[in-house]
Amino acid sequence: MTCHRVDELVELLEAAWQKDADLNLIQFLRKLADEAGFSGPLTELTDDMLIYHLKMRDSASDAVIPGLKKDYEEDFKTALLRARGILKN
């Protein structure tokens, strides 16, 4: 994991963990994993899953995932034409 990802994860964890300050780190990670629908061992919990879950945690259920929003198109036809290079930005 690169340094900027560590910084991003720590920043997101710090803000979210303050709301559940009574939990220790492992308990808080297990809570996040459960919220994200991850039921495996914590050793298999990826940084990507934690980062995206923490970013999306308080978002609406139909909100666009960060990182995908830049490529988001309202309709399939426009997305297809743009992907084939027929439509330019």
Image (tube, rainbow, N blue to C red):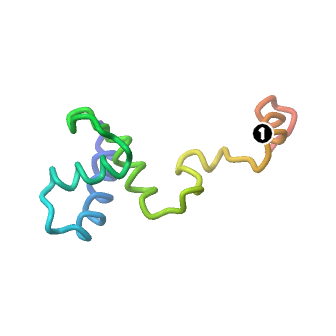
User: 9 left or right of 80?
Assistant: left
**Residue at image coords 82%, 31%:** 85
Pick the front one: 40 or 46: 40
**Residue at image coords 17%, 53%:** 27
Name the residue that disc number 1 marks: 79
Q: Where's residue 3, x and y in %?
A: 29, 43
Pick the front one: 41 or 69: 41
Q: For the residue labelled by badge 1, is the local secondary structure a helix, a strand or a loop?
A: helix
Q: Quadrant of residue 22?
A: bottom left
Q: Where's residue 61, x and y in %?
A: 54, 57
**Residue at image coords 76%, 32%:** 83
Asked if residue 13 is positioned above or below residue 49 in the image, the reply reads below
* The furthest residue to the right: 86
Q: Where's residue 49, x and y in %?
A: 37, 42
Asked if residue 87 is positioned above or below residue 14 in the image, the reply reads above
Q: Where's residue 82, x and y in %?
A: 80, 37
What quarter of the picture does the C terminus occupy?
A: top right
User: 13 left or right of 87?
Assistant: left
Residue type pointed to by label 1? Ala
User: 81 left or right of 45?
Assistant: right
What quarter of the picture does the N terminus occupy?
A: top left
Pick the front one: 42 or 51: 42
User: 26 left or right of 86?
Assistant: left
**Residue at image coords 87%, 33%:** 86
Q: Quadrant of residue 38?
A: top left
Asked if residue 64 is positioned above or below residue 84 in the image, the reply reads below
